[in-house]
Image (cartoon, rainbow, N blue to C red):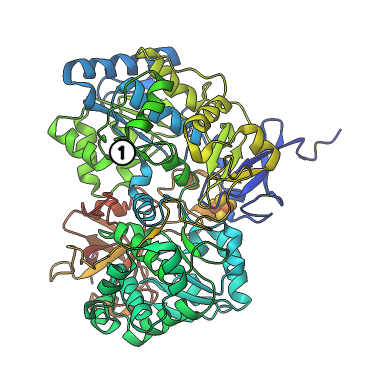
Amino acid sequence: VVDLGMPNRTVLTTCAYCGVGCSFKAELRGDEVVRMVPYKDGGANEGHSCVKGRFAFGYASHPDRVTSPMVRESNTDEWREVDWETAISHVAERMKDIQTRHGAGTIGGITSSRCTNEEVYAVQKMVRAAFGNNNVDTCARVCHSPTGYGLKQTFGESAGTQDFKSVAKSDVIMVIGANPTDAHPVFASRMKQRLREGAQLIVADPRRIDLVRSPHIEAAHHLQLNPGSNVAIVNAMGHVVVTEGLVDRSFVGDRCEDFDAWAEFIGGPENSPEVMEPITGVPADELRKAARLFATGGNAAIYYGLGVTEHSQGSTMVMGMANLAMATGNIGREGVGVNPLRGQNNVQGSCDMGSFPHELAGYRHVSDDAVREVFEDLWQRPILAEPGLRIPNMFDAAIDGTFRGLFVQGEDIAQSDPNIQHVTAALDSLELLVVQDLFINETAKYAHVFLPGTSFLEKDGTFTNAERRINRVRPVMKPQTGKDEWQIACDIAQAMGYDMAYDHPREIMAEIASVTPTFAGVSFEKLDKLGSVQWPCNDDAPEGTPVMHVDSFVRGKGKFVETPFVPTSERSTRRYPLILTTGRILSQYNVGAQTRRTNNVAWHTEDVLEIHPYDAEERGISDGDRVALTSRIGGTELRAVVSDRMPTGVVYTTFHHPETGANVVTTENSDWATNCPEYKVTAVQVSQLNPG
Ligand code: SF4
């Protein structure tokens, strides 16, 4: 018999990279994955894929994988491999010891948007029920927490309004602070298809992203705004809609509240495109044309990314976009809506599962007695009515000595969070840092216990994508670590004296459904039968909800909120004259922990600094030169790419490699409502290294 290398079994599962949530058939020979084949009936991708989902799975078997638990007394000691029982009891005893000596509020945990809903739910339950506090936060804190806040305030639900297919009915597509062709490629293909069919495009971005440059797409309007001026842009558009009589009066009258106060605010001269022009850098007549197109061009949809949320006014901007959509009647049917493009595979899910310090599963505030009672009855533990610490609060408290023990599930906070010097000082101050991950990442260098996690190929559970679609993740192989990740949180809770046990993740989903009205109709059985469902899924919508807010908003009436523009305190200065903004490239993913370990040369990239020819020439910088990038926070070195994709005065880099570490320069500034870091605006200096 000749072994032709053909696969002998397939498993249907979900990509673990971006928030598009593409379905794949993993084809295996024995236990080895030989191919990932995009699934033609996948609800999000319908047979399409990008390079990451199709080819970047080699990290799961990379030799850097740690598969045994490890402990050490101090974070400068050598690691010592131990068995699971020893590791779990070590974590439980040390967490309990900190509680006893310093109080229950001095420990906490961070959940991961890379993990399944069931794994996330287990960690937040461990923190609330076994740690005895609400000190649980999610890595979505640093990406889409303003989405959760802003859409809840205006529409009543912390989620995007549409399914991806809806874009096929759009006549006007407005992309703000997102680069879908690199970051959400499969959805970008849907969008481009619609644009090729004649839909009009508005892009608001400081950078000439691929959508703007595509020869097949005529970008009707590229609003090349100054970083930090999003709210000025959306307010100016709202101003045009109100003052030029373009409001959808019937929609606003029937479906919304607080319109008159908003109209008076937005119609004020301070919001006019002419007044905003010097702030945004966008000519007033371009802004007026874009606003008229959005209001009168037919179905208009907004798609946005971290270029909206990662600002000091991230939440304000989300509400500003919601105002614009409501004022023009672009909510509640196909082809319209306000749609966050989630960066990670399970950002939506990790937020849904109750891993914010102020909200239990389903975005219900911990101060709500009736909601707490539901969980207290089920968990048989009291839940505090006061919100716990957010991630940045945990760092500050660690440095103050009032926060001492942290459990981190799959987030490399020492590379991905801003002002890394502050983060590492906080991690260094902890008595106990427990890291659960695939690799010894930058954060693990400060850890006392390392608990090996599982890759998506070993997981059994669900991810929820950017369109609220709950997809099944099925195990292709047994956990290489000998333990499922959801089981780790259960074991720690159990060892701390709290009875938390499940036989299978389907039981965790059953518990989620029993306490979360928007998930009441979700079960593994239904997901296996239907393929996927979009929440809300309950008695009112047993097969899920592709488009939200159809007849009424989740909160009843859509709420207009006044959104005054407040400039960020981060400004260019004589010493730091340029503004740095950040983003991703197609072949890499976030901090690169997985994509850098794919054994594929296409992933041998580096972070570079894009700089406009004028700014480069002024500094004697040629294409390919090594340059120093410095802010008031810190500095790094990288290679310059001289390019007119950026306007003068603005430079751009990515954050995929720890060596270049873009976040050593980003600042402590954050969104006023959610503390989402302001990654997108940092005043910097760029200088050529070794000039002459
Ligand atoms: Fe995976 Fe996103 Fe690419 Fe789909 S678009 S294959 S979910 S990385």
Residue 122 location in percent, x, y? 44, 27
Q: Is residue 667 above or below residue 349?
A: below
Within 8 Å of ligand 1, the CB of disc 1? no
Depth check: 360 or 377 in front? Answer: 377
The crowding category of the residue bearing disc 1, from other C-alpha atoms within 10 Å (few below 14, some 14 to 19, many at least 20), is many
Depth check: 434 or 195 in front? Answer: 195
> How many discs appear?
1
Image quadrant where one finds the C terminus: bottom left
Residue at image coords 60%, 50%: 22
Residue 275 occupies quadrant = bottom left
Q: Is residue 361 above or below residue 280?
A: above
Residue 316 location in percent, x, y? 29, 60
User: What SS does tag 1 mark?
Assistant: loop
Horizontal side of 463 relative to 618 (left or right) equals right
Horizontal side of 353 relative to 39 (left or right) equals left
Horizontal side of 137 relative to 524 (left or right) equals left
Q: Residue furthest bottom?
A: 285
Q: Is residue 508 above or below residue 425?
A: above
* Callout 1 amino acid: His
Residue 242 location in percent, x, y? 35, 78
Depth check: 160 or 434 in front? Answer: 160
Q: Visible in this render: residue 343?
A: yes
Image quadrant where one finds the N terminus: top right
Judging by the rendered image, the residue that carries numbered circle 1 is 358
Q: Is residue 416 above or below residue 261?
A: above
Q: Visible in this render: residue 83?
A: no
Depth check: 366 or 661 in front? Answer: 366
Residue 108 location in percent, x, y? 29, 29
